[in-house]
Amino acid sequence: MQFGIFSVSDVTTDPTTGHTPDDTERVRNMLTIARHADEAGLDVFATGEHHNPPFVASSPTTMLGYLAGVTKHITLSTATTLITTNDPVRLAEEYAMLQVISDGRMDLMMGRGNTGPVYPWFGQDIRQGIPLAIENYALLRRLWTEDVVDWEGKFRTPLQGFTSTPRPLDGVPPFVWHGSIRSPEIAEQAAFYGDGFLHNNIFWPMHHTRQMVRFYRQRFEHYGHGRADQAIVGLGGQVFMRKRSQDAWNEFRPYFDEAPVYGHGPSMEDFTRETPLTVGSPQQVIDRYASFVDEVGYYQRQLFLVDHAGLPLKSVLEQIDLLGEEVVPELRKIVEAKRPADDVPLNPPTHAERVAAARAAGEAGATHVGDTADPYTGTVAEGTQPAASQEARA
Amino acid sequence: MTMSSGPSGIHPTRTLAVVSAGLSQPSSTRLLADRLADATVRELEDAGHTVRVETIELRDLAHAVVDAMLTRFPTGDLARALETVTGADGLIAVSPVFTTSYSGLFKSFWDVVDPDSVTGMPVLLGATGGTARHSLALEYTMRPLFTYLRADVVPTSVFAATDDWAASADDPGAGLPRRIARAGRDLAQRVARRENDGPVDPFAATPSFTELLGGS
């Protein structure tokens, strides 16, 4: 199982000091956090994508492209990439570029975004959220797998003879997850394509998560991608740890009480009981998170939210150290022992595994599209017509 | 609170959920709710049904209701109360009238109920207030709320002012017991005819991907 961290990139005042980082400080803190996670041996760093204050992560591929250059092992990902308000043509280009730059050390997760006003800023309408997610992703896949695309849909101008560059690394597109909290349609979409499904359950009780994951697994099997227990599942989570449980509880309480997302609502006692938020010792985190496999079946990626609610950078880095040194090695041992069978994937697929599978199936695409016709469609990229056809027209 | 009563026979058991938004203890709102429940149970038992009554005091759930508004998921006793309400065959909903309308707690509770979950459910409305001048609050606030929820609201709703409780049977206008009996009859007839067909499966309505793709 992979263990990593994901950030929503919120700028929040530290309630204990009154310090509010400016946008530059917050962005640089995220870079430090990601590099630290890499050094601590965590498997994944994922950034959110937001286009409104108090969030700063508006340009994920710029951030992840930089991180690809300064990290060594960690998989760079998103949580989530807005498949609704981004032009799928730009997504195809940007994430193929990131894939090439990171040498395949990346994947990405599609999400709809739940902030209504964001949609019109990008020319869209939140009431069309699901249809946008369906159409845009269908186009994105074609842009990655087909060299030259003729396309017409509802939500953007048609494409004629369009080739997205760079072509995916080794002719194999990045692995894609779909994140959803409440919409079974998105679990259905992930299952249809045999993609991963991440339920970001950080604000939700486990019985809800269990239902959503079960539905995705059943549909994954229905669409013939393997058995239900072979589907690729991820979960969210959030923790705050100190060696002594009571220290964690005392230190985190003011952050919990003032956090924009759950402050002034349920007590920390209630919230830690009902949701994955775990405040306590590393051993308590291990015990709690080891039980999730029993709820949703063996899953492949666990992401933790650690840098939110105004926590200072130093505390966040300490959380990452505790994860890397104490939690992950032990937790991994426990949960991987619960994997029901050898043919249940241990981890989400790596780029190398996907390339090997694509080549074995004869499905790896071209790594350059020049002046030759697409072998599937017989069409050529616009502006690169072979000399023969130009002569014929003249 | 659960009470089972009546003969078990060929008629299936019916479950009545009673939601009372009274704040004091004892509360006249709860008293009215119990009277309405008794009247309904009597009618259903006379028709041969076994009846289970589940009473929900919103006062006990007040903090959980606010938490659910902030977190968007209900927990603990509130989650169980919501299952009771949405799984019932009939509902009695009673609120005090505050500042010309049902109480804020009463409204907040219905705000966290899935709006599709009481569609078609027989509902009897009751309200309490200091004077009879508030009696129409039932008709201009409470009835529209349940009409929006597409519940099957019975024609008789019962308002009890302080005076109503004090009136002796001989007093003119001592109609409260009569109105309670009539309302119970109305609700019982509807509940006898209809059984709750279970919770809506949120996944059953999910279109297949082919439909999603075709619809985009």
Image (spheres, helix red, strand yellow):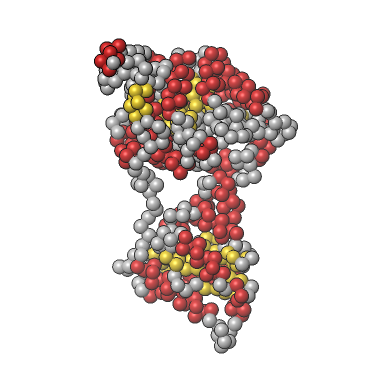
Q: Can you give x and y, in whole percent of width and height, for residue A154 in the image?
A: 38, 37
Q: Can you give x and y, in whole percent of width and height, for residue A302 in the image?
A: 48, 28
Task: Residue at 51%, 79% (x, y): give it.
Answer: B177
Instruction: Choose top left, top right, bottom left or bottom right for residue A25.
Output: top right
Q: Quadrant of the N terminus of chain A?
A: top left
Q: Nearer the viewer, residue B154 or B197?
A: B154
Task: Residue at 40%, 21% (x, y): give it.
Answer: A164
Vertical relation: A281 (above or below) B171: above
Horizontal arrangement in the rendering, residue A309 relative to residue B124 (left or right): right
Q: Can you give x and y, in whole percent of width and height, for residue A353 in the image?
A: 37, 17
Task: Residue at 56%, 84% (x, y): give it.
Answer: B173
Q: Quadrant of the C terminus of chain A?
A: top left
Instruction: Choose top left, top right, bottom left or bottom right for residue A316.
Output: top right
Vertical relation: B216 (above or below) A2: below
Residue closest to the far front? A394
Q: Can you give x and y, in whole percent of width and height, for residue A40 in the image?
A: 56, 18
Does residue A181 appear anywhere in the picture? no
Vertical relation: A374 (above or below) A9: above
